[in-house]
Amino acid sequence: MPSRRNFLRNSAFVAGGSLLSSSVNNQAFAYFKNKTAPSDQLNIAAIGVNGMGWSDVTAALKVPGVNLVGLCDVDKNVLDKRMGELGKMNVNSSKVSTYGDYRKLLDNKNIDAVIIGTPDHWHALQMIHACEAGKDIYVEKPVGNSIGECRTMVKAQQRYNKVVQAGQWQRSQQHFTDAIDYVHSGKLGNIRTVKVWCYLDWKQPLEVKPNGPVPAGVDYTKWLGPAPTRTFNPNRFHFTFRWFWDYAGGLMTDWGVHLLDYALIGMKVANPKSIVTVGGKFAKPDSADETPDTLMAMYEFEGFNIIWDHAVGIGNGNYGKDHGIAFIGNNGTLVLNRNGWEVLEEKKNADKVIMPFQKSSDNGLDKHWVNFVNVVKSRNLKDLHCPIQAGSDIACFSQMGNIAYRSGKKLLWNAKDQMFADEAINKKYLVKEYHNGYQLPKV
């Protein structure tokens, strides 16, 4: 193990204290970083830096001893923009190499860990190749774009024994832990239903746009990778790729993996008995989106159900909140989201609040990165807050809902064999077809 992976021995007091608050700026962290011996630095690089990949970079650089040495993106415009921002982050850009091809980045032996912040359809290949290259990995959610991809990613981590953290940063946020402890206390009584919802009024259905030329500086062939070859369309590119089946799974896999994750944690389950989903493009049927703007999925378990409900272009969700998880029990309902949590008594005393609103007070992304870096140093993989197996479980769970919607069928899930009872559904949806000469590696 490179000696720089022991760097937290020199700075553990920072990792455990209040200096990890998001209120502390990068200058403060730079002070501690400069006190760390060069041999104890952890060198990281990022693949895909247009969205969350860049948020991950900024969070990583708050951890003492973390050193950015590489950035990769197929859009040179994005790459140039991020390189220009490094000065404001007290990072010497002359020490950061840039790449248009992630395989060349992985060949750099000076890189210890990589961030994968590319569109969903690239996550599996890049994570597996990073494992093969001997890197530790922080991979954005959803970890895979199909159930088959997720399983292969887990196998790769197991084969190469690398530290792989999924970007489910809510697992590092204290108020989520506190809320789930309350759920597990039994005070809510028998929980019959868990409602999970996401109503995004800031996201509107996409206007239809014509195909056009590939923007200057973009390697569109590399951007497509294993996805089907298509003429360039701006709707299918940065950020809005999320609403097309070739690359992602809509709100179900974008926000669903975060929120449904806590439904499963709260109920201590992973495998439903059946899944049925209804929805469609109801807000604007002629929009450019492929994924549904309105969707409701019911997952059946023994003794209770989990219900997912999403709506694009509407913000008036359950309990007056635009997103959340509600554990509905005989004695009360616990309502949890990124802002905090509260417990409402059952309606016989509807005005009585059992637990007043407990506001979030920390930064989950920052803490998630501290957890990742600590485990890179310790090699105690059991200490990861969201190992690849957990990221795979929730990504697969979300995929089940999308597959039920796309097939138009009520699906039975075989927990023992980890596949649907309908073999035709398995054949069509379990493993995503790769194109352009790419293949999902056999691990």
Image (cartoon, rainbow, N blue to C red):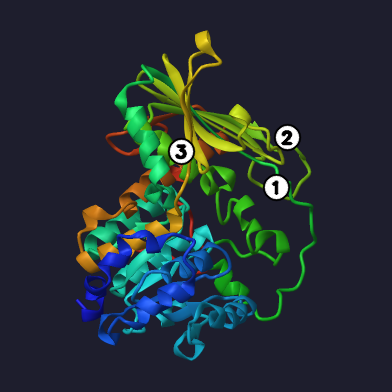
The picture places residue 434, in percent across and down from the top left corner, at 48, 60
Q: Residue at x 46, y 38 (%)?
A: 260
Q: Amino acid at mark 3?
A: Leu
Residue 14: image tag? none
> Which numbered disc, 3 or 2, marks the residue that appears first in the sequence?
3
Secondary element at image label 1: loop
Q: Can residue 271 be seen from the camera position used here? A: no
Left or right side of 157 for 263 = right
Secondary element at image label 3: helix
Q: Which residue is mark 3?
A: 260
Left or right side of 21 for 39 = left
Task: Name above or below for residue 287 compared with residue 276.
Answer: below
> Which numbered disc, 1 or 3, marks the residue that appears first in the sequence?
1
Q: Which residue is mark 2?
A: 282
Cα distance between the residues tagged 1 and 2: 17 Å
Cα distance between the residues tagged 1 and 3: 21 Å
Q: Residue at x 54, y 75 (%)?
A: 73
Judge the density around disc 1: few (<14), some (14-19), many (≥20) Cα neighbours within 10 Å: few
Q: Residue at x 59, y 27 (%)?
A: 319
Cα distance between the residues tagged 3 and 2: 23 Å
Task: Name above or below for residue 340 compared with residue 190.
Answer: below
Q: Which residue is mark 1?
A: 202
Task: Name above or below for residue 53 compared with residue 109.
Answer: above
The reply to whether the C-beta atoms of the residues labelled 3 and 2 are less than 8 Å apart is no
- Which quadrant would residue 197 be assigned to in this image? top right
